[in-house]
Image: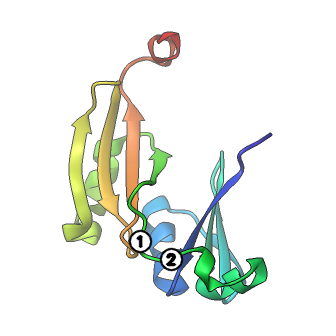
Amino acid sequence: MKFVSIRIITNNIKPLVRFYEHISGLSTIQYTEDFAELHTESIVLAIGSVRTLQLFGGSHLATPESNRSVILEFRVDDVDAAYHRLAEYLGENIVQMPTTMPWGNRSMLFRDPDGNLVNFFTPVISETKTNAN
């Protein structure tokens, strides 16, 4: 098995697509007005409108803007530089400024336009030491 994608279902796809393009510096592939993908080195972030749920059996399957348990995590080269680049853009959506976590990541936490939590992090403990734990 290979984990390759995560999908966000939204009521309003355009702002979410623009947001993820802005924070990542990557372009999405917009397949239809209801579906786009952001390809990173390791995984695809898919963004679909609620209308795409009809293809799976109905809009009752997912509730946009209601995530309270999943954090989308992106490893970046320098979380402090990312913070300085995005602070004004994110504004009040920043939940936590860059902070070094006990497990060895320097992280910043913020919300996307739908309220989903996003974590940008940079490991600050060497990979060898982290993998040994």
Image: 44 above or below 63: above
Q: Which residue does the numbered mark 2 point to in the structure image?
A: 63
On screen, residue 89 versus residue 24, left or right, reads left
Count of marks placed on residues: 2
State the image quarter where residue 60 is shown: bottom right
Image: 106 above or below 17: above
Q: Which residue does the numbered mark 1 point to in the structure image?
A: 66
- SS state under label 2: loop
- SS state under label 1: loop
Q: Amino acid at mark 1?
A: Ser
Q: Residue at x 35, y 25 (%)?
A: 124
Relative image position of residue 39 (x, y in whole percent): 66, 59
On screen, residue 2 versus residue 44, left or right, reads right
Local packing at callout 2 (Cα closer than 10 Å; few below 14, some 14-19, many 20+) is few
On screen, residue 110 versus residue 88, left or right, reads right
Say which of 45 and 85 sits in front: 45
Q: Residue at x 45, y 69 (%)?
A: 22
Q: Residue at x 28, y 70 (%)?
A: 89
Q: CA distance from mark 2 to mark 1?
A: 6 Å
* Mark 2 vs 1: CB contact within 8 A: yes
Q: Residue at x 77, y 42 (%)?
A: 2
State the image quarter where residue 122 is shown: top left
Which numbered tag is attached to residue 130?
none
On screen, residue 36 versus residue 120, left or right, reads right
Q: Amino acid at mark 2?
A: Thr
Q: Residue furthest right?
A: 1
Relative image position of residue 83 (x, y in whole percent): 28, 53
